Amino acid sequence: MILLALESATVEVGAAIAGDHGVLSACAARPGRRHVETLHRAVSCAAALASVTLEEVGAVAVDVGPGLFTGIRVGLAAAKGFALALGVPAIALTSLEVLSHAARCSGPVVVPVVDMRRGEVAWQLGGTTSIGGIQALAAALATLGAPALLVGDGARRHGAALVEAVAALGGPPPRLGGDELGAPPVASLADLGLRRLEEGRTVPAEGLAAEYLRAPDARINFASRPDPAPAGDAGGPFDAGFGSRVR
């Protein structure tokens, strides 16, 4: 069976094609905020390199986050569209799972770290997913008996601060993964997707859901106001507008 893998949850956007003999092709880029146009070009690239048409795809795997809210939504929309149009099942994988799978041969303790912005990161340690500040992750790393390998864009952005914080707590300073592990590799997403497909761990397209881990930055202002305007005070025409920060 042919599997199409879609990655756009963090800073890297890409697509891969996999089959019975493993990953056949992968195309990826780190295009800044151009997730939509990059993802669909990557799909065309991967299909052409593998000499596969989309009509041959029998399942779609997608990274559902955590990561960038816009990037996650782009990947989910594309995965649902392909799966519904082709009438095939979907496979949901998290960015933390994909990073762990990509670095599985790099050492006994691999900790994927995804940058959540606003000074927070998400990480996976001992099968548990957590979100918090740099000091919270450093405290968890300081309890380990050996240096952990940190991978993901959170490790790239906050690596130096994490090494310093863990050392200050008396723990073994972690190692930092290279740039190739600075985002979930789409080839690893495809490989892990094949395993889940063999295990029958699929969902219908309608069952795909994002793994945000927290509320988005953009919120309706009137929903978060502590003191709504009193009755009869209509206010200005844009008082109930949307928040100004969208990531």
Image (cartoon, grey):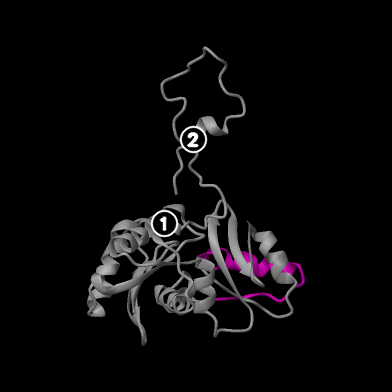
Looking at the rendering, the stretch of residues picked out in magenta corresponds to 153-177
For label 1, the SS is helix
The residue carrying pointer 1 sits among few (fewer than 14), some (14 to 19) or many (20 or more) residues within 10 Å by Cα, namely few
User: Which circle marks residue 43 in the picture?
Assistant: none
Residue type at mark 1 is Glu
For label 2, the SS is loop
Residue at the farthest bottom position:
21
Identify the residue shown where x is 69% and y is 60%.
Answer: 136
* Horizontal and vertical percent position of residue 202: 45, 69
Identify the residue shown where x is 76% and y is 67%.
Answer: 169
Residue 119's place in the image compared with 141, above or below, is above
Q: CA distance from mark 2 to mark 1?
A: 26 Å
| Residue beneath disc 1 | 206
* Horizontal and vertical percent position of residue 32: 37, 59
Identify the residue shown where x is 49% and y is 35%.
Answer: 220
| Residue beneath disc 2 | 220
Q: Nearer the viewer, residue 72 or 205?
A: 205
* Horizontal and vertical percent position of residue 148: 64, 77
Q: First in sequence: mark 2 or mark 1? A: 1
Horizontally, is 71 left or right of 166 in the view? Answer: left
Residue type at mark 2 is Ile
Check the picture and name the quadrant holding the N terminus: bottom left
